[in-house]
Image: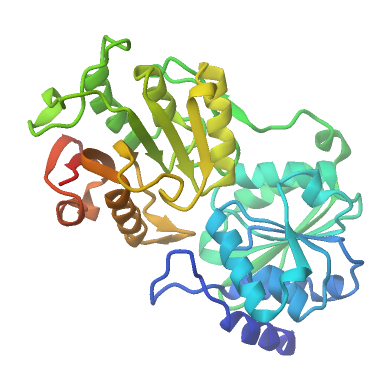
Amino acid sequence: MEAVAASLEELCSSLSREPDFDAPELQAFDTADLLILTTAAARIRSSAPGSVAIIGDRHGALTLGAAGVLGASGLRTYQDPVLAERALARNADSLGLSDSYANTTLGPELLSGAETVILQLPRGLEALEEIAWKIARFADPGVRIFAGGRVKHMTLAQNEILSRYFGDVSAGLGWRKSRVIQAGDPRPTLASSEPPFPKWGNDRELSFGVAAFGATFGGTKLDHGSRLLLRTLDADWAGDHTHPAKVGGTQTGHAARAAAAPEHVLDLGCGSGVLAVSAALALPTATVVASDQSDAAVRSTALTAEAAGVASRLVIHRADGAEAVSDAWADLVLLNPPFHTGATVHAGVGHRLIRDCARILRPGGELRMVFNSHLGYRPLLEHVIGPVRQLARDATFTVLAATRR
């Protein structure tokens, strides 16, 4: 094991996070990647081409380790974040391994005939449940799963979810603060049942249902930060969806109004699509774009928009930040930024998105943003965008509006 781990660690140490968010304290791999691959090494080495599927590879360690050290070919890989796909592609190109894998969607394209699945455990239990159901439904009946993570992020609930869909589930010994769960023997009754995702939810403050696939931030619920942000918009748009009240301007509080209603709106990091769909309903003449780097999020937003009757008026992109729209395009950007990258809390992710907003806002356009109050984004907003006013604040969250100078 140690010799394989050393070879894998040498390869993984050459990997870059680019173009994903990077910082000195962040790495392109961790010991969970090494442990998953070393635990599954014998099975991967003896696998037929095209029989290994990889889920949750963050920057290429699993895919390129399986190909470059363990000799696997015809790998099929699913990565929810678009930046993970791009980092894998860059790293594969630098190692001459671009032909060793193909990115696919999370379904039969990925899993049909798969005899081995290697998985970085997702952060959320619902994401794990969707993955487990799809493996049980589409993979080879003899499939073996090697699912790993850092011990501090693992719970017994993960074993319980896997046990719903597989008759054989066992946890291995810890190694360098990581652990691997193995699973096999798909339960045929559950695997042939109705898919558990997407799920649907309703909220008393929304006039439409909310769809969510497993990895979608917030699931079917309206998270507290988005709820607070949405209330500031309701104060601007309430009561007249044909001629909506204006947003922006230089006044303070919810009475603030601009000269005209926004015509170009971007929901940046759209999640399940609540803010984008709310904007499309309230501003029937506006062009509304929803963007998220998560595959699960854009699929959820599409279903939420369809159920709300605004699918034809909503443009949805899986994209890095605001790259889907041009410079000085937006009258209004709505942002509830993530405060983590993977399992690591890091305010730099929000900083990156704020700087992107500065590029795409027109002069006089507005960024309306909600965030955990302790993160203190206001100085950056004032520096890179312009004058800032506070619209709402509670014990946890703050909503600020920044006008592009």
Residue 246 lies in quadrant: top left
**For residue 250, above or below residue 144:** above
Residue at the image position 82 percent from the left and 72 percent from the top? 72
**For residue 303, above or below residue 178:** above
Q: Position of residue 15 (x, y in %)?
A: 57, 78
Of the pair 73 and 226, the residue shown nearer to us: 73
Residue at the image position 14 percent from the left and 52 percent from the top? 382
Of the pair 260 and 207, the residue shown nearer to us: 260
Q: Position of residue 360 (x, y in %)?
A: 32, 47
Mark count: 0
Outermost residue, left direction? Answer: 251
Q: Is residue 288 left or right of residue 229?
A: right
Q: Is residue 127 left or right of residue 273?
A: right
Q: How is the image coloured?
A: rainbow
**For residue 351, above or below residue 390:** below
Q: Position of residue 122 (x, y in %)?
A: 59, 54
Q: Position of residue 19 (x, y in %)?
A: 49, 66
Residue at the image position 80 percent from the left and 75 percent from the top? 41
Residue at the image position 27 percent from the left and 51 percent from the top? 358
Of the pair 291 and 313, the residue shown nearer to us: 313
- Does residue 210 appear in this view? no
- Which quadrant of the rendered structure holds the N terminus? bottom right
Q: Is residue 61 left or right of residue 141?
A: left
Q: Is residue 49 left or right of residue 399?
A: right
- Does residue 223 appear in this view? yes
